[in-house]
Amino acid sequence: MSIKGAVLFAQSGGPTSVINASAYGVITAALGSELVTRVYAAANGIVGALAGRLFDVSAEDRAELALLPGTPSSAFGSCRYKLKPREEDDTDYKKLLGLFRKYDIRYFFYNGGNDSMDTCDKVSRYFESVGYECRVAGVPKTIDNDLVGTDHAPGFGSAAKYIATSVAETALDSRVYDTPAVTVVEAMGRHAGWLAGSASLASLTGAGADLVYLPEVGFDLERFKSDVNAVYSRGGKALIVISEGIRYADGGFVADAPVPSTDGFAHAQLGGAASKLADVLKDALKCKARAIELSLLQRCASHIASQTDVDEAVAVGRFAAEQAFAGKSGFMAAIDRVSDSPYKTALAAKPLSAAANAESKVPRDWINADGNGVTQRFIDYALPLIQGEFAQPKENGLPRFARLKKVLI
Amino acid sequence: MSIKGAVLFAQSGGPTSVINASAYGVITAALGSELVTRVYAAANGIVGALAGRLFDVSAEDRAELALLPGTPSSAFGSCRYKLKPREEDDTDYKKLLGLFRKYDIRYFFYNGGNDSMDTCDKVSRYFESVGYECRVAGVPKTIDNDLVGTDHAPGFGSAAKYIATSVAETALDSRVYDTPAVTVVEAMGRHAGWLAGSASLASLTGAGADLVYLPEVGFDLERFKSDVNAVYSRGGKALIVISEGIRYADGGFVADAPVPSTDGFAHAQLGGAASKLADVLKDALKCKARAIELSLLQRCASHIASQTDVDEAVAVGRFAAEQAFAGKSGFMAAIDRVSDSPYKTALAAKPLSAAANAESKVPRDWINADGNGVTQRFIDYALPLIQGEFAQPKENGLPRFARLKKVLI
């Protein structure tokens, strides 16, 4: 049953290179629908909605909206905010209901990761419980790719492409001199190793990482040193990629623990796991050791977005909107994989509860037995996601980002 | 007067994204010349030449050589090695003469920065002094852009494009949340601020750095804190770009000095200037502060090379070869700027001695009076160098690097 009313779109959690491609998908579908009276976007996700801070998207220039897919970082701002269960405290829910009623919002799209799907689920159930008719849909995104219910999340493919390309280029650079040197590259991923694992794709260029460590396998410092030494002893070079979230068997993050050194003291150090491990290697191998943190760039480098990822990000946004306009509610737009090669997918509406608060990790048998690399299964999974060169619109040799007016209503 | 014989090409110093584009320029000109009997490349620059380690470039597949412009990092390896004055010790010179005589090398091209131009100059004078006929030419490269005698060095434009693009993308990402945060990005440049300054180009996208610090201006920690605070107090955000080489007025590198903290102790810290300054700001502003080191990526990110830079890198290589084949020796191929807009240049042969061991710094009046940004003059200079999108050849969605056989003779 169709219902006329306004659309509210909001973005949540860590941004990706293509999160605004999904915004573009939702917004263009909404602007093109006869059911939609007005399109709003919340400033900084649910936090903005709670504060009544909404942008009037209908007032935006269409040519600027068309630049959203090449504009990284949540265009309307993001937040990290978890709604309390309504049985505990329904203040936020009542505020949202007031806002939705005031602006006659009948469609709500929340673009985020597993926490956001939880928010979406709670809001959807609350509206249902009070009899307020509103279609609620989750639009997935996360570079971490830890979202359950979808084969992969938009954002991961572009981050993987950035990481694999950067690691391939770094692999060439880091072995340019005739002197011994090791390099430790750190990718994001606190609990899941999808990003670090994607560095393994670099090897397809002929220049890749020698060793890759994921948080799914307990980290053993002695085995690590021995792994690196085996590579290093062959040619005086080693390129290692680690996930920021690698942990010792006792569960402690490598990034948090002091590392032992040969002088017998445990030094407390700044920096993440990569700089700690580079220090360990400098000490153990008596050679130059460099740490490289890929940092924010891996989630905002739209200039090397995967065309596949951009297309899918637009498609899930559009699909979510179309399903909602057709009457569906309480779902997440998901990508099902039909086959790896040729790469084929189908979009599907999955229950929000399936995605909420769960984490998808790299299966153990996608990681090699030694726990220092991935298997072909991982490559077959990840490779299709980095295909295609997105041509980021340029002006003056620099990215031409969408320039939105962002008029608050 | 023309002379027939073999060509020796070698690469030295820190690589760039386009150093192999110059290799391509020299090599294709050499392979196409009737004067050239054979083309060799030294493994790891002058060090390989001294050890008699030469690759036979004539044996390479032409289609692979054509991929050199999209392949970062010195394809034949690099070194950091300074020849002693021959009056002090002529061992190296005699070794080189032996090698050149053995393979009848009559053309020597050395691709590097100011130290390499010094090497080139010394070798050229030595050959002249002993009456060995050999044309010696320097081919400039350096991301640091500190080479005297040329308007700019190939490699700088691509590094500047990478930095400006990354800073623009990071600027959007770093202000996505509704919480206070400052970000300090560190660019390379130990003595000259060309790279940090090029971050200022990002502002043309509408999303750039708030403050930029170059090593040409003495760094003052109190003024820095006050600069950042002025930006931060307006919206709870600040993006700062610094050169790794910023120094205090007493000449000490910020990266080397312990930073004072409010607990009264001077903490010795790991990491470069950016992580030190991020710590200072965390302390002073009581907010989240993140340090991002652009690290090796700024000199090897061929995937976002400037087409202008690639074209110029090929052109200076080819020009050096053509001038040498026409009889010229003891020169560096240089780029003279004719005009900024429209951007016009001319190639010229400059005496090696002019480039050797000198450093070009950012003129004081290209930096603003407060020493925390650049002036329009800097923008006018740098902007033409980042124009044009180089289409790095791809395979499987990843860079398709040149795969050379590198057969040692």
Image (tube, coloured by chain):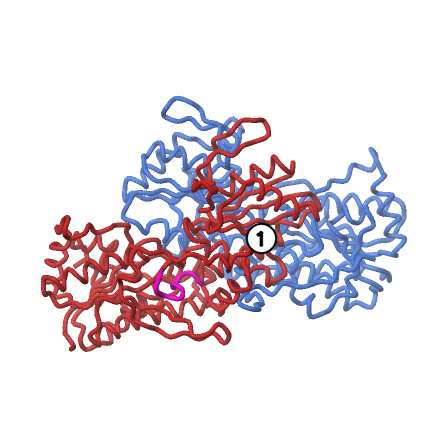
Chain colours: A red, B blue
Q: Position of residue A359 (x, y in %)?
A: 36, 56
Provide the major secondary structure of the magenta segment. loop
Q: Amino acid at mark 1?
A: Thr
Is A3 contained in the magenta span? no
Q: Is residue B377 visible?
A: no
Q: Position of residue A318 (x, y in %)?
A: 30, 72
**What residue range appears in magenta?**
A148-157
Viewport quadrant of the N terminus of chain B:
bottom right
Q: Position of residue B97 (x, y in %)?
A: 87, 48
Q: Which residue is mark 1?
A: A170
Looking at the image, residue A347 sits to the left or right of residue B148; the answer is: left
Q: Is residue B240 visible?
A: yes
Viewport quadrant of the C terminus of chain B:
bottom right
- Place residue B224 in its image quadrant: top left
Q: In front here: A141 or A86?
A: A86
Q: Is residue B113 above or below residue A69?
A: above
Q: In front here: B57 or A87?
A: A87
Q: Is residue A336 above or below residue B147?
A: below
Label 1: few (<14), some (14–19) or many (≥20) C-alpha neighbours in 10 Å: many
**Residue under the image location 73 percent in, 66 percent down:** B28
Chain of residue at mark 1: A
Q: Is residue B175 above or below residue A356?
A: above
**Residue under the image location 14 percent in, 74 percent down:** A3
Looking at the image, residue B152 sits to the left or right of residue B265; the answer is: right
